Amino acid sequence: MLIGEVSAVTGIDTQTIRFYERQGLLPTATRAPNGYRIYDDTVIRRLQFVRASQSAGLTLSDIKGILAQRDSGDAPCAHVSALLEEKLSDVRARQLELAALAAELGRLVQSSHDLDPADCSDADICHIISTPRADQHDTSNARTLSYSPGQKSACINARPQPVPYR
């Protein structure tokens, strides 16, 4: 099967198939006398596995390890289960971080509705963000520039705690 045929069956671009081959996710294709790659039917299933694994959040490195384990004759299911448990834990932790960020953004948006722009001083930079919360007294944590659609200018966010990205 030529690479174009594999691409048509799997919906994966030929450049991506070549990339996967270079990365060791696919066995090296045999070559026809004209230099064209010739793949056997097993590559279809392997490519489908790679895509399904990526959809589950696994990295190409993770997938390569799984495939190597299978290629050595061992069932990789316990390893896959451990990877998926770790991925699920990471996703749940990120959801908590995003929920905290959403709550903080909601507080800032509400604050922006309650504060008068005329009261914003040069020292505050932007009082929407620099107005302290009752439960927050630490001013040592800097954040990034923030901008909302419809806002005339960006505000420098000198507070609150940043939510780390993993």
Image (cartoon, grey):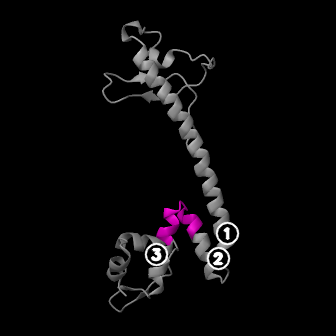
Where residue 100 appears, as percent x and y from the top left, is 56, 34
Residue farthest along the bottom direction in this orientation: 33
Q: Nearer the viewer, residue 14 or 97?
A: 97
18 horizontally vs 130: left or right: left
Q: Secondary structure at mark 2?
A: helix
Decide: few, some or many residues near mark 1? Use Cα within 10 Å; few <14, some 14-19, many ≥20. Answer: some
**Which residue range is magenta in the image?**
50-63
Decide: few, some or many residues near mark 3? Use Cα within 10 Å; few <14, some 14-19, many ≥20. Answer: many
Where does label 1 land, which residue? Answer: 79
Where residue 32 appears, as percent x and y from the top left, is 37, 91
Q: Quadrant of residue 38?
A: bottom left
Residue shown at 33% from the left, 24% from the top: 151
Given contact means CB atoms under 8 Å apart, are the residues at marks 1 and 2 in contact?
yes
* C-alpha span from label 2 to label 3: 16 Å
Given contact means CB atoms under 8 Å apart, are the residues at marks 3 and 1 in contact?
no
Residue type (three-letter) at the residue carrying disc 3: Leu
Please tell me whether mark 1 or mark 2 is closer to you in this view.
Answer: 1
Image label count: 3
Residue type (three-letter) at the residue carrying disc 1: His
Say if residue 24 shows up in the picture: yes
Residue shown at 53% from the left, 34% from the top: 101
Looking at the image, tell me whether mark 2 or mark 3 is earlier in sequence order.
3
Where does label 3 land, which residue? Answer: 47
Q: Nearer the viewer, residue 124 or 148?
A: 148
Where does label 2 land, which residue? Answer: 69
Residue type (three-letter) at the residue carrying disc 2: Gln
* C-alpha span from label 3 to label 1: 19 Å
Where residue 13 appears, as percent x and y from the top left, is 35, 71
Say if residue 166 shows up in the picture: no
Residue shown at 58% from the left, 75% from the top: 67
